Image (cartoon, rainbow, N blue to C red):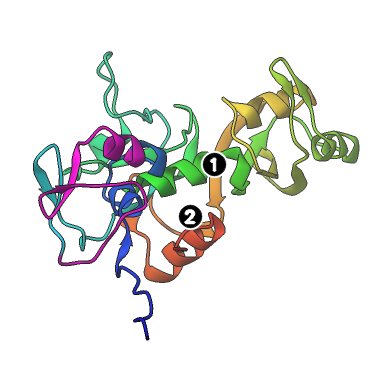
Amino acid sequence: MTTDPPTSTPGERLQKILARRGYGSRRKAEELIRAGRVHVDGRPATIGQRADPSARITVDGAPIDAEHAALTLMLHKPPDVIVAASDGRGRATVFDLLGDVPPGLRHVGRLDRDSEGLLLLTTDGELAHRVAHPRFEVAKTYEALVEGRPGEDSLARLRGGIELDDGPTSPAEAERLRHDANGWWVRLVLHEGRKRQVRRMLSAVGHPVRRLVRTRLGPLELGDLAPGASRPLDAEELSELRALCGLDTA
């Protein structure tokens, strides 16, 4: 007697599809599935279920397009712009810079109002979660114009970690870059993202920040993107970022 070999269900895990389409992280997608709000071809979905591109997937009865790729943007945040979907005080937000905002688009982490530089926005809930989560240690590179001339002792303290009011920081990469008409610039590379962390670290070593620009996020580089402008990540950038976060695995 012979038996047919087991067959595997083609397609991608449902929670990955939902996360990529803006329904939150995979954990949030699993909560939707457990709550019975997700159906595949008219049947209640189950955790771990796979769906192929031809499947009709619905959330609360509304279909999603499983083949539609998530949108991930890089934006050059200018100063005096709020990183928020809206502002009750009527101040400009990063979403005002985008014009038409796709459903589910969210900012990944924050830059304070006075800071500028690279900000990531995406409809991919799982990617947003992983880039922002300290466990994945996505490097954030900043260039800061500071008061005074940072000496090697100050840089060494930054490299070793600084005691702040919310606890010690992780060690940072720190180097003095250049001097211009406005003062000295330093570069810091962090693998965590607390509120106003760079400003607090530099103030703690006696060099308050005059200007702060985030120039890199993981493999992404701000480059010559103009302030206020945005662009989608290209395929190579997106692939590198997802790989860094442990995505694109079954």
Q: Where, by quadrant of the figure, is residue 37 drawn?
A: top left
Q: Is residue 220 left or right of residue 191?
A: left
Mark 2 and mark 1: span between their CA atoms? Answer: 10 Å
Identify which residue is drawn at 48% across, 28% down.
112
Instruction: Write down the residue under mark 1.
Output: 213
Which image quarter: residue 95?
Answer: top left
Q: Which residues are magenta?
A: 29-54
Q: Residues within 10 Å of mark 1 (few under 14, many from 20)?
A: many
Query: x, y (%) of residue 227?
Result: 38, 46
**Label pair 2/1, CB-CB below 8 angstroms:** yes
| Amino acid on which disc 1 is placed | Val
Q: Which residue is mark 2?
A: 222
Q: Nearer the viewer, residue 128 or 139?
A: 128
- In the rendered view, does 72 fall on the left or right side of 102? right
* Type of the residue with mark 2: Leu
State which quarter of the image contains the N terminus: bottom left
